[in-house]
Image (cartoon, rainbow, N blue to C red):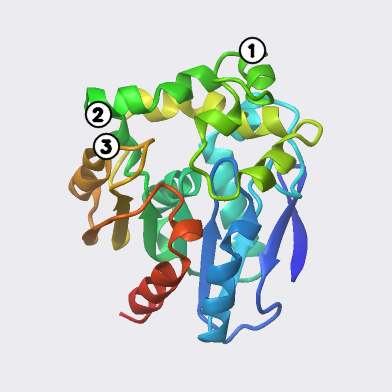
Amino acid sequence: MRDSFRNDGLTLSYLDSAPGDTQRQVVLLLHGFPDEASMWQRQIDALHAAGYRVLAPDMRGYGESDIPTSQRAHHWTRVAADQVALLDHLGIEQADVVGHDWGAVMTWFLAISQPTRLKRALAMTVGHPTSYARAGIAQKLKGWYTLYFCIPGLSTWLLRGKGLLGLRRVFGTHPQMDHAMERVLRPGRMRAAIRLYRANLLSVLFASHGPAGVPMLGIWASGDPLLTEDQMQNSGKRTDAGWTYERWDCGHWIPLEQPERLNQRLLEWLSS
């Protein structure tokens, strides 16, 4: 079921598999760029059938959530605060959190800044922010697009097209690119989506962040064209409550490319 709540002057949309059910263990699923909450549908179905209550929000500016009027409103502190506000809105004290791509970044920030609200956390593809920032030259080369996205006006315009710098080419391995393009081509959505990069580039690359305060599972994909293994593998050095690392042989879009394997792993992880 889709619902919404208000936070920071915005109406934010989310999916809730069991509205009002206070007995189920809660799992919060956080999407990345250029996706939205619906990317988790296979995981929502499997986890709900196994007895969990699953929440999947559209990040501010994405999906059906409102678009903030300023770039600074996309800073990680405010995006992460949306997730805490959702839990508060529903009267939920703690949740297990699972994130992919930018959702993984927010998962790390929640594990760092709000450990009492998390039971444990799973980050896919992106490691601890400081580990990502200090990764080697190979990661800098793979992450060239993060700088490209930060060019105002030009990148927003070029990403809409079909050329070498269009989103279809830059993120060409996305399994549902036609659907992704439909989403970001809606009025204001492309700029809102890449503002997440623009508002956080300095915070991720040049700031040092503390350790995660909850048990963490990190999954990296060997076929990921965007992220190197060291930035995830070395994240274990920045956790205080336990760390497990797994390398999977697939591409970047794990929830879409490996849904059945991910569902099975989630159920094992949640019951451990």
Name which residue type carries label 2: Arg
Name which residue type carries label 1: Leu
Q: CA distance from mark 2 to mark 1?
A: 28 Å
Q: Position of residue 32 (x, y in %)?
A: 53, 46
Q: Quadrant of the C terminus?
A: bottom left
User: Which badge, 1 or 3, is on the more N-terminal residue?
Assistant: 3
Residue 168 numbered mark, or none: none
* Residue at 63% over, 71% down: 91
Of badges 1 and 3, the one in the foreground is 1
Q: Quadrant of the N terminus?
A: bottom right
- What residue is disc 3 on? 131
Residue 117 in sight in this render: no
- Closest to the observer, 176 or 39: 176
Which element is circle 3 on?
A: helix
Residue 19 in sight in this render: yes
* Residue at 57% over, 13% down: 151
Q: Is residue 242 left or right of residue 200?
A: left
In which image quadrant can residue 184 be found? top right
| Proximity of marks 3 and 2: CB atoms separated by less than 8 Å | yes
* Residue at 63% over, 24% down: 159
- What residue is disc 2 on? 134
* Residue at 64% over, 25% down: 162
Which element is circle 2 on?
A: loop
- What residue is disc 1 on? 154
Q: Position of residue 110 (x, y in %)?
A: 44, 51
Residue 58 in the image: above or below residue 95 = above
Q: CA distance from mark 3 to mark 2?
A: 5 Å
